[in-house]
Image: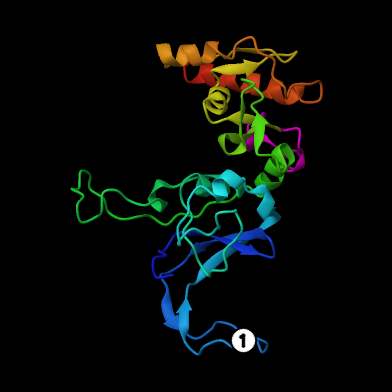
Amino acid sequence: MLEASTGDIVFHYSRGAVRAWSNVLAPAFDGPPPFEDPTTRWSAVGRVIRVEMQELDGPIELDSIPLELRTERDNTGWPFSRRGAVKQVYLSEVAGPLADWLLTEVGLRVDVAQLSSWPDDQMADAQIEYRGDRRVVVNARGEQSLLRKHLFGDELLATCALCGRDLPVAMLVTAHIKRRADTSRAERGRTDTVMPACLIGCDSLFELGYVIVARGGTVERGPRRTPMTDDLSRAVEAVIGRTCSAWDEATEHYFAHHRRFQKARARSYRLD
């Protein structure tokens, strides 16, 4: 608990599921229990960490967390046992692919400032003028965990809708077909507004307009042409001509919005 710093993310696990996440407001301090429970005998003084908690719309059940992520490490500080069961501890560090997966599930982005530093601070030579972290307030996507649950359920593997690769679900994101910023409140509660897209590249190719999905479901070259490199061109060519598994008559109007938006953006920013 003494290692927790202001701004760290904490995931709260109870009754077989992750049910909330919170921001650490200040480092731990010695103090009495912040609550009274007549059925439990607590010591008079312990350590207290104050947090700002956000309850999840839908709990993340233990079995929905990929087993390979739970058993990625085997040390005393890891929150899971060798078999993937939850250890009976107060607070454990979560890092690496498991942290990325959980942050994605709750609609947060990975902040490299939360990861372990290397080299140690005492050994690092400053190369930029670092003035400390800035406190920011962000809104988490309230529907994100439910949409991801809809797409992947309890599966360990799933298929990218654009390239067709079969991948671990940790390498797939819940990609909005219609730009989320343009969706209505009602649309954000619909499951046909999203598709699985891989982190190998399809999510970015689609979001940035290098590829689009035409009426009929065929993946085509998007209106964005610049900046372009030989490596990027090969990545685009690899998915051109494939059939997007998320396309049908019901989702066509979302894909149509994506085509119009990307065409307007390319024209506005001279990316075509």
> For residue 12, which quarter of the picture?
bottom right
Q: Position of residue 231 (x, y in %)?
A: 42, 15
* Residue at 50% in and 16% down: 235
Q: Label 1 belongs to which residue?
A: 36
Give the answer, above or below, for where 13 lies relative to 139.
Answer: below
**Residue 133 percent location from the top left of the image:** 35, 55
Residue range of the region highlighted in magenta in the rendering: 177-193
- Dot 1 falls on a residue whose secondary structure is loop
Quadrant location of the N terminus in the rendered image? bottom left
Q: Quadrant of residue 192?
A: top right
Give the amino acid at mark 1: Glu
Q: For the view shown, which residue lies furthest in the front direction?
A: 82
List x then y, in percent, for residue 171.
56, 35
Colouring convention used in this rendered image of the protein: rainbow
User: Dot 1, crowdedness within 10 Å: few (<14), some or many (≥20)?
Assistant: few
Residue 199 location, x and y as percent?
54, 31
Answer above or below: position of 200 versus 149: above
Q: What's the residue at 65%, 23% (across, down)?
A: 258
Q: Main secondary structure of the magenta part?
A: loop
Task: From the viewer's perspective, tell me whether residue 241 is left or right of residue 134.
Answer: right
| Residue in the foreground of this view, choosing between 63 and 162 | 63
Residue at the image position 46 percent from the left and 51 percent from the top: 95
Closest to the observer: 19 or 209? 19
In the image shown, does 56 or 79 lie closer to the viewer? 79
Q: Is residue 61 visible?
A: no
User: Residue at horizontal 53%, vertical 14%?
Assistant: 236
- Quarter-wise, where is residue 215 in the image? top right
The answer to which of 118 and 261 lies nearer the viewer is: 118
Q: Identify whether 2 is placed above or below 71.
A: below
Going by the picture, which residue comes out furthest to the right?
249
Whether residue 36 is in magenta: the answer is no
Q: Is residue 257 visible?
A: yes
